[in-house]
Amino acid sequence: MKVLDSTSFGFVCAAILLVSNVQAACQGDIVVATQQDMDQVRNCKTWGGSILVDNSGASELKLNGVELLEGDLTISNNNGLQRLAFPKLQGINGQLKLVNNKILSAIQMNQLYAIRGLEVSVHPALNDLKFPAGLSQAEKITIADTTITKIDGFKMTSVKDIEISNNIYLKSLSFGNMTTLGSILVSANSPSLHLDLSQIDGVREATFRNVAQISLDKLKRISGDISFISNSFESLDMPSTSDISGTLTLTDNINLSNLSMPQLSHLGGALSVGGNSKLTNVNAFPNLQQVDGTLDITGGFDEVQFPALNDVRGGLNVQTSSNFFSCDAMNKLKNGVIKGNSFICKAAVAKPKSNIKGKGSAGGSDFMENAGNSLSLGYLTIASATIAYLFNAL
């Protein structure tokens, strides 16, 4: 029997359907050291509290019976734990935290599809992370310092925060259903990581490091900063992006030779481009009209073009090691377009130097400031209120 559905009202339905099973014996926070401790909840479809497994001696644990957990499920610092199973669990109204279980190699959660937050960190023996039912609802996801090679079953359309870092064997990652995202950090995973964010149309803030391939086909607007640093991709194509309210940073992407942002018309912060040794022409911004921060472009390029640019509210720093570069086009921007006090344009420089300090942003936006808040104000909050009300009525 499937207790929850995949809509934003899934937890409300669960609350109504399962409240009859929530009695005094099915409430409270528990600390688990053995399977016997865990089995004290086995007769409860809904458990009205949190479960903590910390520094136990168990090698295998199974959460039997529970379909909806109202609190957090934390499993941490269990040096002998090898296998975990949540055979009936469908939803967690709090956090699922799996932290520092050094020989944990198998996690079974066949029915889980809705949680408030997921953290999987410091797991040197864990090879995969699977959500067979499809994880369709989550606010925050952190996966860090693991040996995971594959993640299956991410089906969310909206997430508030994502961090995927230091998973050195992770070669592919897809958020193919996601359209709305708060912040995302992807860093120091496998150097051959392919990242699919092709359906995203809006993000608050993003940082991408050490990525081999990235898809951002539908991304229209970034309401904060977006950074691409030390990636290995040869091409970065953002065909739909029209507005970035913060700073755009493109630094030390040593293979980048093709850069295209044909629709970008406004930058609310700085444009910082540097250390991209194969980028010989900076001509990716044919429609860029306004930059509220600084133009800072350094490297070995032969040409820089901004045919539509009419307003830069900060300064300009263009330095290249190329002997073929001419500052004529930049000098035309000096009077009227560049409003800042600093204006530097140099060719044949031995060591081109960026003048950007910090993010160089000026201005901002509250666009998507509450990205993902529909989750916290939707199924989770409503479910908690519903269950609390029904508890009091019992």
Image (cartoon, grey):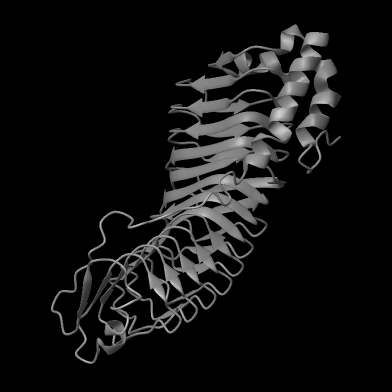
Residue 63 rendering spot, x and y as whole percentages: 66, 25
Q: Is residue 6 above or below residue 385?
A: below
Q: Residue 338, position in %: x, y?
A: 32, 72
Residue visible at 78% across and 13% down?
391
Residue 357 position, x and y percent, is 25, 56
Q: Nearer the viewer, residue 118 or 275?
A: 275
The answer to whether 130 appears left or right of 64 in the picture is left
In front of the other: 215 or 170: 215
Instruction: Using residue 234 as the reference point, say whether residue 89 is left or right of it.
Output: right
Q: Return the residue nearer the eye: 237 or 82.
A: 237
Residue 90 visible in rendering: no
The residue lying toward the viewer, choosing from 336 and 43, is 336
Residue at coordinates 82% horizontally, 23% vertically from top-left? Answer: 18
For the question of whether residue 129 can be seen, the reply is yes
Instruction: Please indicate whether residue 319 sits to the left or right of residue 293 in the image.
Output: left
Residue at point 23% right, 66% down?
Answer: 341
340 displayed left or right of 234:
left
Residue with the most extreme left position: 350
- Residue 374 against residue 172 in the figure, above or below: above
Tell me which corner region of the image, top left, top right, bottom left or bottom right, holds residue 111. Answer: top right
Which image quarter is the N terminus in?
top right
Q: Position of residue 319 (x, y in %)?
A: 22, 77
Question: Total marks drawn?
Answer: 0
